[in-house]
Amino acid sequence: MSNARLAGRYAKSLLGLAQEQGQLEVVYADMKYIQAVCNASSEFVNLLRSPIIKADQKNSIINSVTKDKVSLLTNSFTVLIVKKGRERDLPEMATTFIEQYNTLKGIHQVTLTTAVDVSDALKKSIEDKVKAESKFVTVELTTKTDDSLIGGFVLAFNNNLVDVSIARDLRDIKKQFLSNEYIGKI
């Protein structure tokens, strides 16, 4: 089970230290790398969370995965969290660091889900439209495909959801038919 409060505290401390040392962009890239490793390898996350594997073994494995890929500051951070026994929360710490960085820089995460892949021109158009409508300065657009949408799209940002998919329209029509709104009550 993840500990969001703990991850937030460690991420905030790392963010402050990175700012203090003028390495914010470098550590941000490092956290993106660690997040990508954690997302790509469930075995790596299981290793971090395993109570059976000793701390020195975890440290050497983390070091081998991140060797020449992360900065000295990030490497020192991972050594510290292993020493403190907090390595199980490293994936959440990386994600929380990225969220805090985005908040600091005014970057807004926007997720576009469509039934089929969309062109780069359409992505740019949607990104520009979101910027114009919401007054966001910087938008980081992530795209996903989900063929169950049938058509249309779902746009998610800042706890808002814009669902103009055909699947949603079909669910709405089904609800209307099930509630018998068009049949007179006898």
Image (cartoon, grey):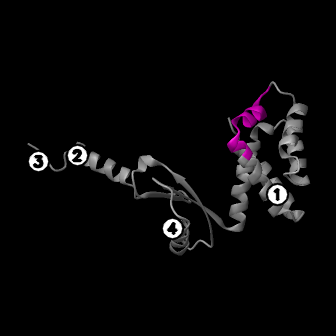
Look at 85% across and 36% down and name the residue there: 61
Please report the residue visible at 50 percent of the width from the left and 60 percent of the height from the top: 118
Identify the residue under disc 4.
Answer: 122
Residue 6 at x, y = what percent? 75, 44
- Describe residue 166's horizontal placement relative to residue 104 as left or right: left
Q: Earlier in the sequence, mark 3 or mark 1?
A: 1
- Amino acid residing under circle 3: Gly
- The residue tagged 2 is 177
Amino acid beneath label 4: Leu
Secondary structure category for the residue under label 3: loop
Badge 4 element: helix
Q: CA distance from mark 2 to mark 3?
A: 13 Å
Q: Is residue 161 visible?
A: no
* Viewer-nearest of discs 2 and 4: 4
Single out the mark in the foreground, 4 or 1. Answer: 4
Camera-side residue of 158 and 6:
158
The residue that mark 1 highlights is: 27
Q: Is residue 182 left or right of residue 131?
A: left
Residues at discs 2 and 4 in contact (Cβ within 8 Å): no
- The dominant secondary structure in magenta is helix
Indicate which disc residue 184 carries. 3
- Residue at 56% in and 74% down: 135
Give percent across and percent down for residue 50.
Answer: 77, 29
For the question of whether residue 171 can be seen, the reply is yes
Q: Is residue 167 above or below residue 139?
A: above
User: In the rendered structure, which disc, 2 or 3, sits on the residue that comes first in sequence?
Assistant: 2
Q: Which residue, as the protein is rendered here, is positioned at the far top? A: 52
Residue numbers of the magenta segment: 37-51
Q: Are marks 1 and 2 in contact (CB under 8 Å)?
A: no
Q: Which amino acid type corresponds to the residue marked 1 in the rendered image?
A: Val
